[in-house]
Amino acid sequence: MGLIILISLSLGRYQVSIINVFRILINEIVPLQETWSSEMASVVLNIRVPRILLAVLVGSCLSVAGVSYQGVFQNPMASPDLLGATSGAAFGAALAILLGGSSMMISMSAFIFSLLTVLIVYFIGKKASGNSVMNLILSGIMIGSLFTAGTSLIKLVADPTNQLPSITYWLMGSLSGAKNKEVVFVALPMLLGLTPLILMRYKINILTLGDDVSKSLGINPDHMRLIVIVASTMITAASVSISGMIGWVGLVIPHLTRKIIGNNYQYLIPGNLIIGGGFMLIVDNISRNLLSVEIPIGILTAFIGAPFFAYLILRKEGAIHD
Amino acid sequence: MIDVKNLSFSYGKRKVLQDINFHIEQGQKVAILGPNGVGKSTLFKCLLGLEHQYGGEITIEGENLKKLSCKALAKKIAYIPQSHPLTFDYSVMDMVVMGTAHQFPWFASPNKEAYEAGILALEQLKMVSFKNRIFNQLSGGEKQMVLIARALAQKASILVLDEPTSNLDYGNQVLVLNQVETLSREGYTIILSTHNPQHAMKYADVVIALSDQRIVAIGEPKVVINAALLKELYKTDVVIHWIGDDAMFLPKKDDQENDVFVEAQNG
């Protein structure tokens, strides 16, 4: 992981060798003799470090949120957008762009609307009678599509010369907005959400067995599910509020990790943290370096994620026939 | 050990259980006998603390069930559900160790002792060689045994088995029921539901027969189970043949019924 980060720091239009990257980083702690130019230090510290940190954080968070949702909803097809967190964020961002907000305000608005959406979904799901898990999923689909429609409406009325392109670009997902200030702003809710998930990770296993079995094993499924949903939603909202819509990561990485280290959440959560972060970093490197124009990372994750997912499914079929 | 007084339960306006009273002693093997859909599962849900909206009172070891947290209840009573496929492929070992989940705080993962308890439970059932197998790929009987092992790892002294034989072939039914017998000899209190009178007769100390929301018979199987009771439970005529101490239940065919009728006329 450390190596991927170092290599990523040296990649880019502006040439900086790995050795110099290493020395620039060390220099922040212990002063070294400067073998690099001040531009190099500036590029590495002010542009690449925040971006790479963000890529790792977003990748980790979306993957952990995805795998946690899969557990609480007992559904391997669940992903972080299941309860409308991403549709809400998209609406919030589009609204802020329409009203001419700064990039900070766009992120704020996306974050708040994302949480708000899931809150509405949760209360509708709770109020409805019957199977609570199914109700949550259904109201997630419902409220999610409502906010997607809202986003479409905003796109319709947005100024087509500057607002519409920036909404569209935001929806495609990108990490290019990363600055040190913003990374700190999202890192806080991310750490706040990741901490309970990491701590209570083993007990998510129990939730996958269903409510009755969970209770009879001494674990209250309602409390657990609420905490996991709140924490997962927080990290999803924080991620999409700054990176825009990055699809597939929250579905593909959990499945890949399940294939590699099994289904026990004790190892699954740390596994997703590392593999998700590493995957996003590699994809972001491609996004930055493949063409002279940056490719929105949401497009790349879909291009890489979808075929990869197909491969995983096909391989699983094969394993059953063996 | 378990006291049920005036238990009643309804889903909305539909009454499922009424006037249920019984007492279970430590170490007893109790079979809840009745046709499908008579409220056996509902009774279990009440006993396991999964449904709290019942009327009457249930006490376990002198404590009111409604006042026990699910963690406290899990220390006393373990549930062995009907085996069903899991959403995710867990190994047998993972499944068994999940029985220990109530023993450590919410932020902790199972420690070495939890895994040792898991191995011990598997050893008790002679299932250690299965520990790295995938639960979903086991046969129905093997799954049921793993679920029993999980209940043993839970270290509760009361085991509640919901129709433990319902999805199993003949050999596995015998395997599971013999295991239940062994556990009973080791001191566990066993409550199982079944719709098979043969199983209740052979494996239970006490039979509680449910029909039409109520207990229609309760007591020693040899005393309680007879053709009249089975007629009441299953609306079917059954002939009971005794071979030594073992009872055999055969459905009465239509022509047999005629024979009886003819004999009665002649008499």
Image (cartoon, coloured by chain):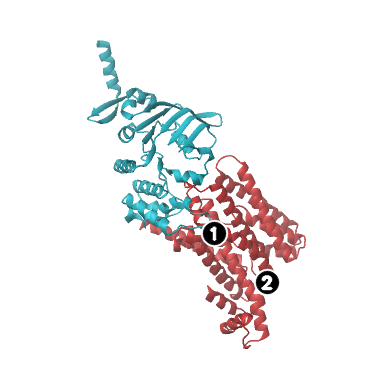
Chain colours: A red, B cyan
- Going by the numbered disc 2, the residue's amino acid type is Asn
Residue A180: give its label: 2
Q: Which label's residue is closer to the chain start, 2 or 1?
A: 2
Residue A234's x, y, as percent?
63, 58
Residue A90's x, y, as percent?
67, 58
Q: CA distance from mark 2 to mark 1?
A: 28 Å
| SS for callout 2 | helix
Question: As rendered, which of A243 and B144 lies closer to the eye?
Answer: B144
Q: Residue furthest front?
A: B62
Residue A192's x, y, as percent?
62, 61
Q: Chain of mark 2?
A: A
| SS for callout 1 | helix
Q: Chain of mark 1?
A: A
- Which residue position holds label 1? A199
Image: A50 above or below B190: below
Comparing marks 2 and 1, which lies closer to the viewer? Answer: 1
Residue B115 appears anywhere in the view: yes
- Kindly identify the residue that appears in the image at 47 percent across and 47 percent down: A217
- Compared across the picture, whether B214 is left or right of A138 comes to left
Around disc 1, counting alpha carbons within 10 Å, would you say few (fewer than 14), some (14 to 19), or many (20 or more)?
Answer: some
Residue A215 appears anywhere in the view: no
